[in-house]
Amino acid sequence: MNHHLRVSVARFAAMLTIVAGSISDPANAALPPALAAAYAKDIMQPTCVGALTKDGEQHEVTLATGERIFLVRGACGCGASNCKVGVYTAQGDGYRSLLLNIAQQFVAKPDGTLVMTSEDDAWESERSSYRWNGNAYAIVSEVRVFGKYTKPVAEPVQFAAGASSATVSGTKVTQHFPDAFKFGAAKGQTLTLTFLQHDPKVNEVYVSRFNGRSDGTILSPTQSGDSYTVTLPSSGDYLLEIYGADETFRSYTMTIAIK
């Protein structure tokens, strides 16, 4: 079986859905100039400020603790095409940026919970959950969603004390619902991935550098049977993704060795 290491590119829908009952102002389609400026800065499109004051969407929720939270989506081409949602709170005469994420749907509630969901494709979505801590929205979890099933966006590889290798396995891998693992390594170390067993249709393995998401860097390993070896180019975190060839759940067992 020939496996390929590459990086998947998420495809996000350019649509934002507001969940009824969660946002106190779901129809305000004009942004104050200061809020438009804060959002334009976050999406690195300062020329959009004028358009945002006319066409941008703002949605407000008041938390039980009294803070007013503003959720913004730009209707101009630079913001809306990627469905970027900014979250802010008022600060003096301006607004303080709390987070920026890509979302198709979001739910913000007075109890301090915030959930953003983005679609990778027609089969899979990603859901990020946050909790207000009095000063910011702290990430609680990030999961992939496939029907009724969920799994971490990136699960840490657990190495035993003193060990340089670990075994991972999965039973629900599809073409659009991968298993994903993150691990740290030093520049010059060698990564070896070996399938101990796998369904023949578990046929794609992606490896890239990781900074909360894949950064798009492709690693080119040397293949020998079901083993793949590559020298890691830099110190830091890496992401391993394992995919199937179709939408049927497939299984595998793999060792990850770093030396």
Image (cartoon, grey):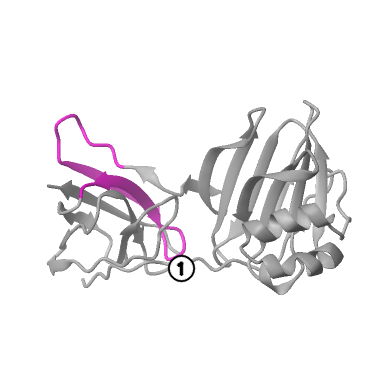
Left or right relative to 21: residue 252: left
x, y percent for residue 165 = 17, 43
- Front residue of 175/62: it is 62
Q: Characterize the local packing of mark 1: few (<14), some (14-19) or many (20 or more) Cα atoms within 10 angstroms.
A: few
Q: Which residue is mark 1?
A: 9
- Front residue of 253/128: it is 128
Q: Residue at image x 42%, y 61%?
A: 174
Q: Residue at image x 12%, y 66%?
A: 225
Q: Residue at image x 68%, y 36%?
A: 113
Left or right relative to 41: residue 4: left
x, y percent for residue 197 = 21, 55
x, y percent for residue 76 = 75, 71
Please tell me whether mark 1 sits on a helix, a strand or a loop.
loop
Q: Is residue 230 magenta?
A: no
Q: Is residue 166 magenta?
A: yes
Task: Give the image quarter of residue 79.
Answer: bottom right
Q: Residue at image x 80%, y 62%?
A: 56
Left or right relative to 219: residue 98: right
Region in magenta? 157-186
Number of numbered tags placed on the structure image = 1
Q: Amino acid at mark 1?
A: Val
Task: Give the image quarter of residue 192.
Answer: bottom left
Whether residue 104 is visible, yes or no, is: no
Task: Give the image quarter of residue 78.
Answer: bottom right
Image quadrant occupied by the N terminus: bottom left
136 up-or-down from 257: above or below = above
x, y percent for residue 204 = 31, 66
Whether residue 212 is visible, yes or no, is: yes
176 up-or-down from 134: above or below = below
- Front residue of 226/250: it is 226
